[in-house]
Image (cartoon, rainbow, N blue to C red):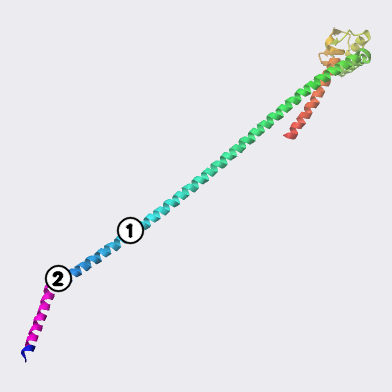
Amino acid sequence: MSPTWVTFGFEAANFLLLMALLAWLFFRPVRDAIERRRAQIEGEQRAASESHAKAEQERQALVAARSAFEADQKAVRERARREMEQERQALLEDARAQVAREHGRFEAERRAARVADRHAHARDAALAAKVVVERLLAHLDAGELGPGLVAAACRDLERLRGGGRPLGSVVVESATPLDPASEARLAAAVGHEALSLRVDPTLVGGLRVVTDRGLVDASVSGIAAQAALQLEDALEGGLDAERADHG
């Protein structure tokens, strides 16, 4: 073998030995360091992934909490809106009821005032009718009405004596002194001659007989008062009918 190949073989052996030595002294620690770094990086990546997953869970929890809070707030607002609407409706109903009560009270007061006014007019009309009737009967009493009133009083006295019952004490009041014929007619109607006679100009005309069994009023003032009372009753009846129609 030539010296060149021997030298080449020796150099190659040295190179391989050097490479083995370098691999044992340098590459292996570097590889170990690289492996450790890779493991550290993988651990950091796993920690980052876990942290990211935890952060995502926390984010989702926050989103869910926010959604629940917004739903609660929406429910609270809706409940408050319904309560406000109910309160508004209640206030509106109270206001309507108050207006209806006030309107009813006003109508009742108005009807009462109208009825009172009609009552006053009825009384005034009755008083006016009484005056008119008194004047008319007073004018007629001096003529044919006087005997007619005496006859009417006698008929009423005879009805009071129906069945033969005594009238007891009898007081005859007349606007002017009675003539003997009228006294005799009254005594016959009463059933005895013990008459107590009185003159009362306020009767205007005619006479009034007071007995223990009742009163017979055939005077002008009594007839006028009776006519006024009947007129007032008729007007009152009309008012009652009107109130019934509006009731």
For this rendering, which residue is in front, 120 or 215? 120
Is 24 in the magenta? Answer: yes
Residue at 57% from the left image edge and 42% from the top image edge: 89
| Helix, strand or loop under label 1 | helix
Label drawn at residue 100 = none
The C terminus lies in quadrant: top right
Q: Percent from the top left, x then y, of residue 192?
A: 88, 10
In this view, 207 is above or below 239: above
Question: What segment is highlighted magenta in the picture?
Answer: 6-27
Residue linked to disc 1: 55
Q: Mark 1 and mark 2: span between their CA atoms?
A: 38 Å
Asked if the residue under mark 2 is in contact with the one under mark 1, i.e. CB atoms within 8 Å, the reply is no
Determine if residue 169 is in view: no
Residue linked to disc 2: 29
Give the residue type that dot 1 points to: Ala
Q: Percent from the top left, x then y, of residue 119?
A: 75, 24
Q: Which of marks 1 and 2 is in front?
A: 2
Give the residue type that dot 2 points to: Pro
For this rendering, which residue is in front, 192 or 152? 152
In the displayed structure, does residue 49 sit left or right of residue 104? Answer: left
Q: Percent from the top left, x then y, of residue 212?
A: 81, 13
In this view, 230 is above or below 182: below
Based on the displayed image, in which of its 4 quarters is residue 22 positioned? bottom left
Based on the displayed image, in which of its 4 quarters is residue 221 positioned? top right
| Helix, strand or loop under label 2 | helix
Residue placed farthest to the bottom in the image?
A: 1
